[in-house]
Amino acid sequence: MNYKDEYADWAQSYDNFGAITDINEEEKAFLLSIFSKYKVKNALDCACGTGPHLYLLSKLGVDVCGSDFSEAMLKACKENLSQEGISIITKKADFRYLEKVWIEKFDAVLCMTQSIAHLHTHEDLLTAFKSMRERLNNGGILIMTQGTTHLTLQDRFRFDLVVNNQDFSRVFSRDISEGFQTINILDIYHSDKVSKMETNSVHIKIILDDKYKSLLTEAGFSKVNIYGGYDMSPYDKENSWKLIVVAER
Ligand SMILES: C[S@@+](CC[C@H](N)C(=O)[O-])C[C@H]1O[C@@H](n2cnc3c(N)ncnc32)[C@H](O)[C@@H]1O
């Protein structure tokens, strides 16, 4: 299936979520613990976006490189990294076909913040998971995170004020239909000097714990761990605000 770049129009404003240097300390502690457990020395972030995890991993001393499908996101990423004086190899790659641009093998492949859900079919997901697994050393791991859980899919969380500061607010409004969610993103600039609104949207597949387990097993992964938070609590349909996958090659 062909996909359009849903970030082309808002890659430059994407980081209104937060600068890549704004490290989430809980996520950092989680990754440190996983990297220590699996002895991760090098990694590929295969949906690097504007580069937050490239930045974080480089600070953690992991030898990291990145790729992404979106040229606009890669451009923003390169600008961000150069601003921080960090040199990391980044390439344009669809994560279904990583072998086309990466011949190296890694101790970890990361696909963070719901990036995998941009694939819409079982076949495409399977192709991507096989390609990611193929890039892993023996004993390597695939890490994925997302904010979509059984809990957050409840209708009462349909609207979410995800950023709100003096000059800028970002609101999500979500429509769910037949296994997909369209996340409408409303950006409101409201400073003394600027008053304007921008809208964007992403259409993503809803993938939850059981689906991850079956797909990743079908793709050849030997063990699939699903956590409900950075504290590594087990995923819980009633209470989890995050869904984190660590799949062992
Ligand atoms: C929600 S953003 C997350 C970016 C980054 N991982 C983060 O945590 O900020 C989703 C990213 O997935 C990328 N993406 C979507 N489909 C892709 C594909 N088939 N191959 C590689 N990257 C893809 C998008 O271009 C975008 O940069």
Image (tube, helix red, strand yellow):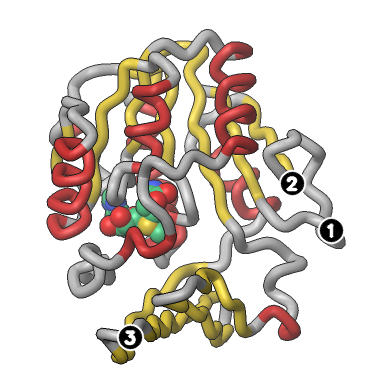
Kind of residue sitting beneath label 3: Asp
| Residue identifier under label 2 | 228
- Is ligand 1 within 8 Å of the beta carbon of the residue shown at mark 1? no
The CA span between labels 2 and 3 is 41 Å
Tell which residue pokes out farthest to the right in this image: 238
Residue at 15 percent of width and 36 percent of height: 82
Horizontally, residue 76 falls left or right of residue 128, namely left
Kind of residue sitting beneath label 2: Gly
Image x and y of residue 206, in percent: 56, 67
- Is ligand 1 within 8 Å of the beta carbon of the residue shown at mark 3? no
Whether residue 85 is situated above or below residue 120 in the rendered picture:
above
Q: Quadrant of ligand 1?
A: bottom left
Q: Secondary structure at mark 3?
A: loop
- What is the tally of numbered marks visible in this picture? 3
- Is ligand 1 within 8 Å of the beta carbon of the residue shown at mark 2? no
Q: Residues within 10 Å of mark 1 (few under 14, many from 20)?
A: few
Image x and y of residue 137, in percent: 40, 14
Q: Which circle marks residue 239 in the picture?
A: 1
